[in-house]
Amino acid sequence: RAQNGNYPIDPRMQKVFDIIRSGRFACGDNEAQTQFCGLIDKLCNITAAGTWDGDRYLLIHDFPSYVSAQELVDKTYADKAKWASLSIQAACSMAKFSTDRTISEYAKVIWGVEASPRPAPTTKAAA
């Protein structure tokens, strides 16, 4: 679709792009402004959407759904009782997850290192 020119930019995202292009975020840093505009140009390269030369991850395409999801989060968060209930339910349904297990798995699978256990602490006899 994008290659046929059918890759519309949500007006809210276009407004963000316009503000960035105005130089407001570069604070007078020409190099930063060039990089910001280059990123926007790449994202707006509609004929290359989905490739390394364009919007590789289709951020522009997904932006409206991101905004809708955030609006739903904001609405849900405003109801503190509902938010607390959903938070507890989410925590209870996480199944097997722990920082220790995750780090251990990364160490073995990704980094290829073995654990180096600490020696047990020694206790001094009371005098």
Image (cartoon, rainbow, N blue to C red):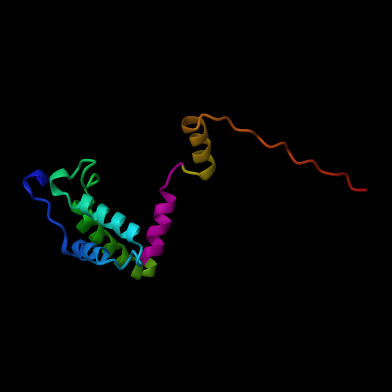
Where residue 122 sits in the image (x, y, percent)? 79, 41
Q: Is residue 58 magenta?
A: no
Residue at left offset 46%, top offset 41%: 96
Bounds of the magenta segment: 82-96
Seen from the viewer's position, the closer of residues 1 and 94 is 1
Outermost residue, left side:
4
Seen from the viewer's position, the closer of residues 47 and 125 is 47
Q: Quadrant of residue 29?
A: bottom left
Q: Is residue 92 magenta?
A: yes
Picture quarter with the N terminus: top left
Q: Is residue 107 left or right of residue 43?
A: right
Where residue 60 sits in the image (x, y, percent)? 20, 53
Magenta-highlighted stretch: main secondary structure?
Answer: helix
Using the image, determine if residue 8 lies above or below residue 49: below
Where residue 106 sits in the image (x, y, percent)? 49, 36
Seen from the viewer's position, the closer of residues 58 and 123 is 58
